[in-house]
Image (cartoon, rainbow, N blue to C red):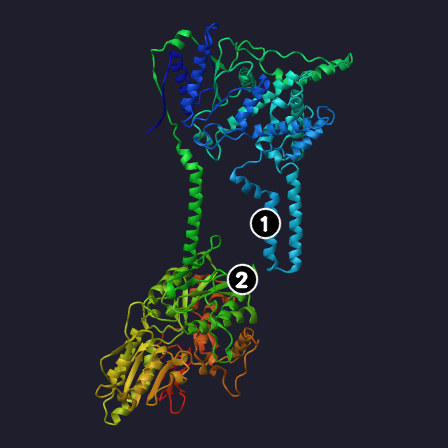
Amino acid sequence: MTREVWQGSAENEAASAVFHLMQHLIDQYKVNRPVMPLVVAQAADADVGPETDDRVEQIVRQIHEANALRRVPVRLLDGDSSKAYEAALDMVRTLTEEPWETRKNSQYKPFSFPRSRLLGAIEQATATVISQPGGGSARGREERILEQLGQLRWRTGRPRSSDPWYSLRNSVRPETFAGAAFIAALTGVLGEISWLLTAVVAAASLLGLAVVRLLSNAAPPLLWLRRASRWFATTSSLAASSTGHPSDGWSRLSPSGSWRVIRARAAAVAERVADAHQDDHPGVEHARQFHLELRVQALLEDLLHNYRPHTLDWRRSKRTVPPVVFLPRATHDNGGILLINAINNVRSRRSEVDPLLLLASLPAAQIMRHTPPLPPEQPPANSAAGSAAARARYDRWVDTLSLGQSPVAAATLAWVLRLPLSTAKLTHEHAHAELVTCRVGRTWAWWLMSRTAVVFVLVGSLLGTFLWSVHWQNEYCHGPLTDRNTDAIWSGSGDDRECVGVATSPEVLFARGNDLGLNGVGKGITFERIERAIREENADIEPGENFVTAVYAGPLTARNGDESLTRKGLEELTGVYLLQHAMNKTVRGPVKLRVLTANGGQDMLRQMTAVKKIVEVAERDPSVVGVVGFGRNTQESETATDLLRTAGLALVDTTNSSSDLPLTHPNYFGLAATDEEQAYALGLVARQIADRLRKKKLTPHALVLSRALRNGDKDRYTAEQRDAGRKMLKKAGFDVGDDVTYKISGGAGLNGPVTSLCEQKPVPDALYFAGRVEDVPNLMKELSENTGCSGKPMTVFTGDDLTKGTFEDSTAIARNVTLYHSSLAPLDKGGNPGFYRDARRSLGALHPDKELKALPTGTPAHDDELFASGQTIMAYSATAALYNAAARGDTRRSAAETWATLHTVELNNMPTGTITFSREKASVSENMHGLNIIKVVRPGPEAVRTVLCGKPAGIPTALTAKDCKP
């Protein structure tokens, strides 16, 4: 809804007619942009008195008042100079140098007048030179004016302002701001870099400041590319004034040629301006007319530029009303008629429509006519005859050509719309029509492209960028704005936060800051060093070399920062590194091995995230041939393996003992003996123990102690192990009681469950512990301290590979307990003793001392705690199997070909025997996996381990009770 801003009464019919004409021209500008005339209102009768002229003048003032508050750019002009030329020139300067009346309440920002400012600089330089001693002489004046323009930097000087912003603007000038920035920067870098580099930076900065100072004192850089300079160098109005340098000398690509044109034209204009200020100069009238019309042309060009279409700020869509100039009383004396004539002449010469609308009142006694013809210039007194006289006439013709193009001799003023107002209409007072003006609304373009909108957009963009940056940093392990990596993301929050996914970016290092070291002689080699060593191996692969990429996935981080929980990931990753280093540096085969690490989180509880990221990486990286790891059986293992199968990736598992995965997933290749296979081997021992008890006329009793399933644990291994253990005890001849469970809350809560089983009558002879190696210390503590169990010999079977435990005092075996567990890596039955020698050499290069300590004389290499857990050996073997399938025949194979070739892999003399997937699955008793049964007792201060029985990998010979005597 439009808002009324002015309401008045038309005192006569003439006022109403002129008012509505002006409002029509203003309001219709938005619709069809009509041609804007120079409207001149004048009493029709020449013999009326001053009261009638006052009525006409009042009409102009009333229309000015009606439009001053409605966002129409208006300017009221009153000529007050004693000379018509100076008055007209002052009015043009007022329009270009002083604010218009609606500056603070306009549709768009104030007008800019770059062309007029350029002419103002020439005028200012000329006035300065003329005011100097001898400045009136034409000799050398041109060079002095150009020199003064250089000092002004071709811009008009502005008077010192009391504006509070003046000090701020003055403080950031190049001379002061650059110097302050230089000092601040130099002070900052002194403490960061060497003195030599500091001196180089200081010298370069001083040279740069000198160049900036030189350019700021001379013409501004890129001056010829400014809009005002381009207009000044190409307008045809000045072509005749600088015939030595025509307009085609200006070019965006030719600074020197363009600069010559601008200087030549500036000198020509300056000469005319200087002549215009000398009353005794013979060509003063010509110079003044030229100066005024050039000024008017610059004004109209600037206004046209302020309304031009196709601009980034959409100014034409924002400015829907024309600029309006009001001359309440235009006469010959106050320069008003001279200004109107100048605008008319320029418009007629240019034949181009500009948006300026002018309304003037003319006293009845004044005659509105063209600029009178200028008197002819007198030829020089010493002009020669003949060809010299003809040349002189040509020179005079060139000088007057810019004015000669103006239609000064035409019969009518083409751009002037005269409104002769009859006396009757000026005095008919009984009409009293109500006149109203409404505020001109800002268009949608103003709201969309206003400073406020731009500020909001910029602030919103910055805020959005900041929020997105924070979001990406919280979402991705490496999430800057410009180089974020989406293959590794943060999972969880607070203390449970872990970086999960695939490390494809150098900035993503899962073991960063993890000082957990290898055991045995590898002590001192940290988790972070192992992961960095893999990165170094990857970096050594030259561009263009053939390589395949294997992804290792394991538990590489811990939620609460307990580095000990990442030991499995450390030892498995060490095995992966040993195979990579052997293939890339020792064997130096034609196909290199690149390794990417993938973190499934503590206990592999976030393996689904890792699998999805592995699939994403494999989709865009065809060198990925398969996955190694996933050595923990959880409720998500089946889904994770199925996702890899869908992506065409084979999984060579390290220590996952699931009995179901090999049967249901063709892409699953496991190196570990399954739960059923381990239970069968333990059952050989359990059957003999049960037979001994029966020989003593005792009924063998047993039960299963297992972890209780809980939300978030996702433990599938416990359930499968519990079922396998129960079946094994029953098959061995034990009377199996009800299962007992224990909860995990900051540790194994075994006090209550052990108390309950120790209070049973009779106390169980055997216990199958379906738990994890980390729970064994608490179990042994409770069995040794509970009075019901402490005095009774007891056999404990467990399916978890307890070689990961050290069985020192903190994890000692209770004196009355004999523990039997399986070992998935029968190191004593493997071949290739050279593996340990090469492994020690490879790891020695990573040690801070550059070598590993020697083992005691006679100690087998595989007995050192560096390899005793079997985790490193299993990961080494799994990586070797995948690499062998991917690089068979020294040819790089795809993921699908690698999957198919894995069925034919047969690696002899490996640390645990023969790694093969080529034969059909044998029976549980004749499995192809390596296995040892370990007996652990504590007759003295420390536990003693004994390999009871076992078989190497790849040998289908079944274990018998004769092999496994308890």
> Foreground: 427 or 436?
427
Residue 493 x, y percent position in the rendering: 37, 62
Q: Circle 1 is placed at which residue position?
A: 181
Q: Circle 2 is placed at which residue position?
A: 546
Left or right position of 893 against 287: left
Task: Name the quadrant of the C terminus.
Answer: bottom left
Res 396 visible:
yes
Residue 623 x, y percent position in the rendering: 48, 60
**Residue that extends furthest to the bottom in the rendered view of this protein:** 696
Residue 347, above or below 686: above
Picture quarter containing residue 686?
Answer: bottom left
Q: Amino acid at mark 1?
A: Ala
Residue 133, above or below 370: below
> Foreground: 348 or 633?
348
Residue 692, above or below 865: below
Left or right position of 816 against 255: left
- Element class at badge 1: helix
Task: Name the quadrant of the N terminus.
Answer: top left
